[in-house]
Image (cartoon, rainbow, N blue to C red):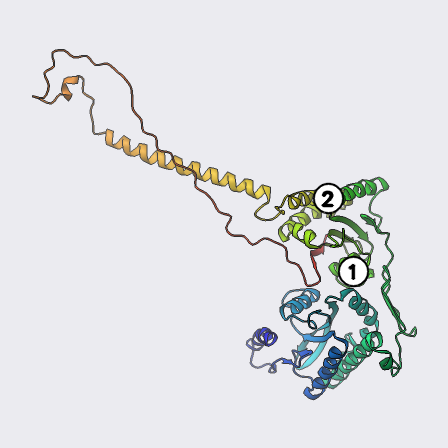
Amino acid sequence: MKKIFCFALVFLALLLPGLSAVPVQAATDYGMIYDVTSSLDTSTMEGLNQDLTALTDELATEYRIDIVRDLEGESIEKYANIFIEQYEYGYGDTGNLIYLMIYISEEDGSISYLDSYMTASGSDYDDLNIFVHAAQPYLDPFLTADAWSGDTEADLQNLSGLVEELCFDARAVYGSDSENENTTREATSVSDTAGQSTVDAAGTAENFVMPELTVDFVMDEADLLSDSEEEALRSRAKELSETYSCNVYLVSVDDFKDYGSSDVMESAKNIYRTYELGYGSGKDGFLLLLSMKERDWALIAYGDFGNATLTDYGRTDMKNHFLKEFGDDDWYGGFDSYLKDAETYLKMSAAGTPYDIDTDPFVIGMKRIFSFGFAAIVGLIVSLVVTGRMKRELETANAAHSAKAYVVPGKANITSSKDTYLHTTRTRVYDPPSKSSSGGSSGGTSVGSDGFSGSSGKF
């Protein structure tokens, strides 16, 4: 029901601009399949939903497909993760999920394929993620612009083939031996060795293999640094990691897409998981990835301490600093800036005050300056008003030339007089400076369902 309400907004936005266009039908939620077009045959879609539901119950992992036509300005990877979190996808207590989002456009009743994204989540994430990479080559033929021809009947047939292939692959890998005996293409092994994620399938398809990396605090595969620069950065990163029990990594590669995803941040996560990075059992750490082919970057954090230390505010501040250097092709300067900020953040977090909008020393200093300046201005205005009023009151009075002028007749018998100056009495009123508040800022770290926080972009 939540999903129907969400896409009802998209439906209204498309419907209102022109009633002369072909009417847009309401989206349909079949259960394990969500179809925003509602133009695909209902009986066939219900059958595919039954197949995915049976697979879900059989393997205790939710297998779900969402067909969408609006990403609301987000990347398809981020939009898929929003769906997973918002609608609480996943099987039972484990939350195990294999999820595929298909992004299409729809004009004049014709469907066109734009993009797709497949991911996994849950307590058995590592194993499920291996399956995602291994199954992708078998599913790719169904996820191309040519496969979605715009002909409704042909598109439905293509989607049916996709679901059939997904079910086959899942049962071949995770099903029982008796079930595998009935398959025409057996999966013979699953390997989760670091650096390699494959499912052997009688050699009929190319398997995904993670490139090998020599695990270290600095992994300069793109060869951006000199030997001395690399050693200097490695020494500092190692010292920070050992001091604060949170590993700090710097990685450069030629093309992030070689690491298992078309999204640079997902590739950074794949590197972090595949090579088992991070400190201790909690795997706390930061990783900054540069990909040189199209000048992409990603900054991620993992673990309770790692995520708490690299807040959303701190991450934005950090990337603003190192991007200035990377934008000028100053690779050492950018990595140096990253380590300097990492040291500041780790030191503050270890002291119990992570670097955030309410703890940023610069922001706090500016607030104090503003508070002091405001109080001084108020005090000056008040003093000018008070002294101005006193001056106006005294303008109507004239000083007497003799003390006799101040004697009330009949009240005193003065035989002699003399005027002698003793002292002046002044009353001072203390005006304390006003207190300013932080404004109730939010702060903190936005952590995804996979346990990572992060951001990415171009440099």
Q: Secondary structure at mark 1?
A: helix
Query: Can you name the residue that lies furthest to the left here?
Result: 410
Residue 151 visible (yes or no): no
Q: Could you tell me the amino acid type at mark 2?
A: Leu
Residue 8 on image: x %, y %: 58, 76
Query: Which dot marks residue 297?
Result: none
**How busy is the neighbourhood of tag 1: few (under 14 within 10 Å), some, or many (20 plus)?**
some
Classify residue 406 as left or right of residue 126. Answer: left
Q: Quadrant of residue 267?
A: bottom right
Residue 10 on image: x %, y %: 59, 74
Classify residue 256 as left or right of residue 84. Answer: right
Residue 143 on image: x %, y %: 77, 74
Q: Secondary structure at mark 2?
A: helix
State how far apart marks 1 and 2 are (Cα): 22 Å
Residue 74 visible (yes or no): yes
Q: Nearer the viewer, residue 390 or 269?
A: 269
> Which residue is located at x 85 percent, y 59 percent?
194
Q: Mark 1 and mark 2 in contact? Answer it, CB < 8 Å.
A: no
Q: Could you tell me the amino acid type at mark 1?
A: Asn
Q: Quadrant of residue 63?
A: bottom right
Q: Is residue 392 above or below residue 362?
A: above
* Label whose residue precedes the other's in the sequence (1 or 2): 1
Q: Quadrant of residue 130?
A: bottom right
Query: Which residue lies under the disc numbered 1?
Result: 270
Residue 332 on image: x %, y %: 77, 43
Query: Which residue lies under the disc numbered 2?
Result: 339
Q: Give the quadrant of the N terminus.
A: bottom right
> Which residue is located at x 66 percent, y 64 percent?
74
Classify residue 380 as left or right of residue 152. Answer: left
**How busy is the neighbourhood of tag 2: few (under 14 within 10 Å), some, or many (20 plus)?**
many
